[in-house]
Image (spheres, rainbow, N blue to C red):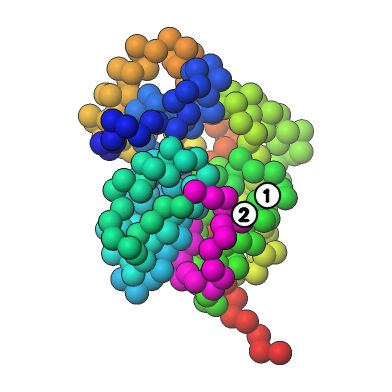
C-alpha cells in the first residue's frame, strides 16, 4: 500500500522495543494483522453481505486493508473511526467523495448519530480492551445500527470453551508482555455471550488457526512480494526481529489454545411499547 511521504506510519516516533506489536509488524511491512488472516476476514464479509444500499461504519481500520475490501462493494456511504491520528490520515488518503470519510475518535464513544448504519464491523481491536471497554464498544455498535443491522467482529479467541482459568491468565499475561499492550481474548462462547448481552442475535460464526506469523500464512495474506518485503525488513532490524520471534514463540507455545474467530450478530428488532 502506497503512503504519502508526509504521512507518518502509526507509532513511527517509538523505538522498536517500545512499540505495540501491531504497529511494529506494520512498520516491518505486515499489512494483514488479523488473527484469522485474510481468509477469516473474507468469511466475515460473506456473512455481512455488504451491498450498494448499505451504510457502513468500521471501527479501528488501522492501515485500511479491510477498508479497501469494503469500498470494492461500493456501499452507499462509509465511515471509519480510528483513534490514531496518523492511521486515520493514511486511511483518509485513499477515500474519495463526501460519502467516504475517516474520523479520529473512540469506538466506544464515536459521536456519530444513532441508528445511522446498516453494517458496523471491527477487527483485532476488542481483544485488546478491558471487559468494560469491550461492552462499551459493542454497545456503541448497537446504538449506531438500525434495527436488523449487522455487526461483525474478527478477534483472537481462546479454545476450548472450558479452558481453565489459570491457563487463560497465563496466556493473557504472556501475550501482553510480548505485544506491549494489554491483551484479553475470550473463548468463543464468551464472545457470543458478549454480543448477545448487548442486544445482538448471533447469525454466523467461524474460526481459523492463529497462524499470524507462520511463513505460509504470511505468504497467503501478504502475497509473495509482500512476504519478501516483510522478511527483508525483519532481517535488517535486529530489535524488530527479536520481538517478532518472541511473539511467534508465544503464539506457537499456545497454538492449541489460540485461534481467530469471526462472529456476525444482527441487532434485534425493537419491540413496540
Give the SS element for disc 2: loop
Verify whether residue 160 appears in magenta.
Answer: no
Q: Which residue bears the numbered disc 2?
A: 108
**Chief secondary structure of the magenta span?**
loop
**41 and 52: which is toward the camera:** 52
Q: Position of residue 202 (x, y in %)?
A: 57, 66
Would residue 43 be seen by someone viewing this image from the given angle? Answer: no
Between disc 2 and disc 1, whose residue precedes?
Answer: 2
Quadrant (top left/top right/bottom left/bottom right) for the N terminus: top left
Q: Circle 1 is placed at which residue position?
A: 133
The residue sitting at 59% across, 66% down in the picture is: 142
Total marks shown come to 2
Crowd around label 1: few <14 · some 14–19 · many ≥20 (10 Å): some
Residue 25 sits above or below residue 90 on the image = above
Q: Residues within 10 Å of mark 2 (few under 14, many from 20)?
A: some
Q: Residue at x 57, y 50 (%)?
A: 106
Residue 230: name its quadrant.
top left
In the image, residue 233 above or below residue 54: above
Q: SS at mark 1?
A: helix
Q: Is residue 2 above or below residue 262?
A: above
Residue 94 appears at what percent x and percent y?
A: 29, 48
Q: Quadrant of residue 33?
A: top left
Residue at screen point 66% across, 85% down: 271
> What span is in magenta?
104-122
Frontmost residue, 259 versus 86: 86
Left or right of 248, for residue 178? right
Cβ–Cβ under 8 Å for marks 2 and 1: yes
Amino acid at each position: 500500500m502506497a503512503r504519502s511521504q508526509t504521512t507518518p506510519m502509526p507509532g513511527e516516533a517509538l523505538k522498536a522495543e517500545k512499540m505495540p506489536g501491531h504497529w511494529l509488524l506494520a512498520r516491518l511491512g505486515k499489512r494483514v494483522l488479523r488473527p484469522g488472516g485474510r481468509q477469516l476476514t473474507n468469511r466475515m464479509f460473506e456473512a455481512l453481505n455488504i451491498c450498494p444500499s448499505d451504510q457502513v461504519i468500521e471501527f479501528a481500520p488501522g492501515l485500511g486493508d479491510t477498508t479497501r475490501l469494503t469500498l470494492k462493494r461500493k456501499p452507499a456511504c462509509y465511515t471509519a473511526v480510528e483513534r490514531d491520528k496518523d492511521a486515520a490520515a493514511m486511511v483518509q488518503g485513499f477515500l474519495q467523495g463526501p460519502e467516504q470519510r475517516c474520523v479520529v475518535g473512540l469506538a466506544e464513544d464515536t459521536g456519530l448519530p444513532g441508528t445511522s448504519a446498516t453494517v458496523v464491523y471491527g477487527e483485532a481491536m476488542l481483544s485488546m480492551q478491558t471487559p468494560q471497554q469491550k461492552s462499551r464498544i459493542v454497545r456503541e455498535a448497537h446504538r449506531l445500527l438500525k434495527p436488523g443491522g449487522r455487526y461483525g467482529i474478527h478477534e483472537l479467541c481462546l479454545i476450548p470453551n472450558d479452558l481453565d482459568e489459570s491457563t487463560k491468565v497465563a496466556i493473557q499475561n504472556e501475550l501482553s508482555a510480548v505485544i506491549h499492550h494489554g491483551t484479553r481474548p475470550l473463548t468463543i462462547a464468551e464472545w457470543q455471550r458478549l454480543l448477545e448481552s448487548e442486544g445482538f442475535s448471533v447469525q454466523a460464526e467461524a474460526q481459523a488457526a492463529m497462524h499470524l506469523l507462520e511463513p505460509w500464512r504470511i505468504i497467503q495474506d501478504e502475497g509473495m512480494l509482500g512476504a519478501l518485503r516483510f522478511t527483508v525488513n525483519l532481517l535488517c532490524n535486529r530489535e524488530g526481529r527479536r520481538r517478532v520471534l518472541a511473539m511467534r514463540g508465544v503464539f506457537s507455545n499456545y497454538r492449541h489454545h489460540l485461534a481467530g474467530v469471526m462472529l456476525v450478530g444482527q441487532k434485534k428488532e425493537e419491540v413496540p411499547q
